[in-house]
Amino acid sequence: MDNHTTIIYLATVTVSGILILWWLRRYFSSLEKRRMERLTRVEEFNAVKTGSSVRSPVGHARDHAQESIQTRYSVIRRTFLIAVFIIWIIALAFPFIGKIPATIVSLLVGATAVVVGIATRPFVENLISGIVISLSRQLRTGDTILIDDTYGTVEDITPTHTIIKIWDWRRHILPNSRMLSKDFINYSITDKYIWEHVEFWVSYETDIEQVEKIAKKVVRESKYCANYEEPRFWTMGTEKEGVKCWVTGWTDSPSDAWSLKIDIRKGLIREFQNAGIKPHRYWHNWNPESENPSK
């Protein structure tokens, strides 16, 4: 490059770098502000409503989550700014790199890459995964999820790991790289309404119309049922063990869904006992010639 071209290049890179740094600061500040505002609206940090020995557990969890968001976005912001700054310096130095022997440049770059890669691989993997989780919005503090058959709420997302508070108040801690690769159900990503169901079986001798009436009544009478529509009843299978049934009802939140299922099971047992409905028979030995269950 001649002197005139070099000056134009350096000026362009300098202005571009300043604009990118300014935009990144505004972008991450806006994201942080939106996440903080959302936390003020989160009413539940427990997958299941419980009485707790912790004083003001929701307020404590919200304060902790807000502090965590500030820390996390501070780390993300600094990481991006440092990365952009390094790239910016390299871009500024690019016209002068030709004056340095290529062998020395190659050795320095190669040695640095090897040392940094070996020393920081786990940390960098989790840090990058944490940034992806934070920016993708697939998982947020306060969300209720089902992961590895574990039902809980996301209590914290740090730059390197995610903390899930499961229903019995234990903490399930996962590195962000593992969290990013796992399948999970997020009950809060769009709304918290759940159409919950309970599965149960009855024998073929049972009046299925009576069973449907009882099942719907049990759902309606639960205080956790949100009466947006009439409970539904389906026969989901006719097996040799009996008739598989489902009854469903709406709830306003994942914690209410948990309690609704418990109410439905208790109510079905109580109402079936009162109505003289016996549990279905398990036909352990099947005689295909007679097509009758052996007693």
Image: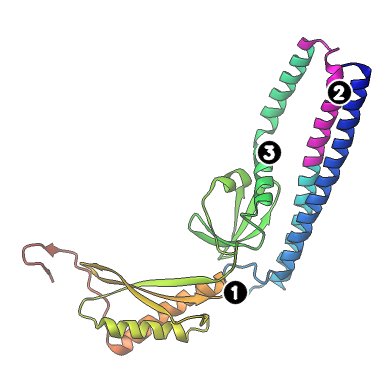
* Badge 1 density bin: few <14, some 14–19, many ≥20, Cα 10 Å: few
Amino acid bearing label 3: Phe
Q: Point out the tag, 3 or 1, that comes first from the N-terminus.
A: 1
Give, as a three-letter code, the residue at label 2.
Ala
CA–CA distance in space, label 3 to label 1: 36 Å
Whole-number angstrom distance, CA of label 2 to CA of label 1: 60 Å
Give the residue drawn at x 40%, y 72%.
198
Residue carrying label 2: 93
Horizontal arrangement in the rendering, residue 120 relative to residue 224 (left or right): right
The numbered dot on residue 123 is: 3
Q: Which residue is pictured at 29% across the width and 85% down the height?
A: 210
Q: How far from the left and from the top, in percent, is residue 150?
A: 51, 59
Q: Mark 1 and mark 3 in contact (Cβ < 8 Å)?
A: no
Under circle 1, the secondary element is loop
Residue stretch rendered in magenta on the structure: 80-103
Tell me the chief SS of the magenta region: helix
In the picture of the structure, the residue carrying the numbered disc 1 is 50
